Image (spheres, rainbow, N blue to C red):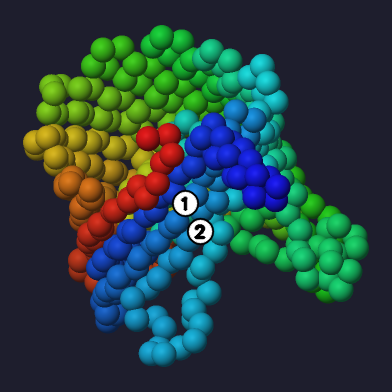
Amino acid sequence: MKRQYVILGLLLGCLQFAQAQFTLDGEFRPRTEYRNGFGNLIADDADAGFGISTRVRLNAGYKTEAYKVFVSLQDVMVWGENRQILPYDQNNSFAVFQAWAEINLGEGWSTKLGRQVLSYDDQRILGGLDWAQQGRNHDAALIKYKKDKFILDVALAFNQDYSHPTGFVSTGTGYNTTGFFSYKTMQYAYLKQAWDNFSGSLLLMNNGFQEFDTNNDPDGVSNLQTLGTHLNYKAGSFGLAANAFIQTGKRQGEVDVKGAYLLGLDLSYKASDKVGLGAGLEIISGNDADPGETGAFFPLYGTNHKFNGFMDYFYVGNHANSIGLFDVHVSANFKLNDTSSLMVKALNFSGEQELASGEKSLGTEIDLVYKKKFKGFALVAGYSHMFAADGMYELKGITEDAAASTQNWAWAMLVLKPKFLNTAK
């Protein structure tokens, strides 16, 4: 009799598995970089940086009609960072990158809970930051609604330290992770409506940043509001995308934010099956306010590497309360054959506000990216060159005589994404 129950249990388990979908896939992404002015102007007497890092991910997903579960494990390794026969990971980079469950509530409604990537539109304010080997994630709870071409997401996040003897800090305000606009609380509503050739979205977001008293004890929260829209139009070979955002409230340190804004416009044109052209501009307000106030906008949790030059001189862990930016750019994308392409982009930078000297011009950057697809993997390589103007030397705090005459960056990356198992197939 026991054997019959076991067989029946196995059959029921197989039936449930047959009605669900299980996926197991991964990613292996080694990247070699030569850095001779990446992120900042390098001094003439400094050595260029060279190194190899590898991102490894293992992703498991399980999907039924009632719910989805997804777990992504990740490690980022720099070659040679661990000494030989070390029994542990010296850089402590192994992490759970994503771990979430999405429950179907019916009639277009669902809820998604856990560690997840938040990415919308062109990723200007919220994005996955996939270029960075570590990526970007959030611990959040979402209520989601989708019907036809309309989307509504409402998100809540509350971050806390688990370092108090009672398990959580008793006051509920203990949170000692600061920097890079790490938030204590977050709430946002995202709405998007799409039509045949046009789509528009609206983002309303509030971020609460932990404040501290003179003893470095938690002391309230400063709230920053970001409001704006992303518009996208496409007709035939022509495309247009626009961003318009404002910020108000308080930054961490109880700094009043007044009149901060971001405006962007990008045009695209497909000249032929093998040539795509682009042009655009972006204006990001800088700090022209009195002490204790700022008029500088910061794009917070977007994939900032996509914007304002691949050499990351602006808004990638830097330029947070500075002179802002006026970025004018043109680009061309060439399809060389069925498996390869080349992108060329030129960007000219100026400050939205003047530097102390009255200078605004910052320089020009040239970016090249080559992509080649092979059977089962891809090769991506790039080269960038910064032609710094007088204002860039002043902004970065180095004289032209002390800086290296060549400011450049080169990289090459393999991308392998093996599909180990998919029960739907």
Task: Give the CA separation, mark 2 to mark 1.
Answer: 6 Å
Does dot 1 land on a helix, a strand or a loop? strand
- State the residue at coordinates (30%, 70%): 52
Estimate the x, y position of residue 361 in percent, counting from the top left: 34, 49
- Residue identifier under label 1: 59
Q: Position of 208 compared to 281: left or right? A: right
Q: Earlier in the sequence, mark 2 or mark 1?
A: 1
- State the residue at coordinates (27%, 79%): 47
Q: Amino acid at mark 2?
A: Leu
Residue 17 visible: yes
Depth check, front residue: 210 or 25: 25
- State the residue at coordinates (35%, 65%): 54
Depth check, front residue: 122 or 396: 122
Estimate the x, y position of residue 416 in percent, counting from the top left: 29, 53
Image quarter (top left, top right, bottom left or bottom right) of the C terminus: top left
Marks 2/1 in contact by CB < 8 Å: the verdict is yes
Circle number at residue 73: 2
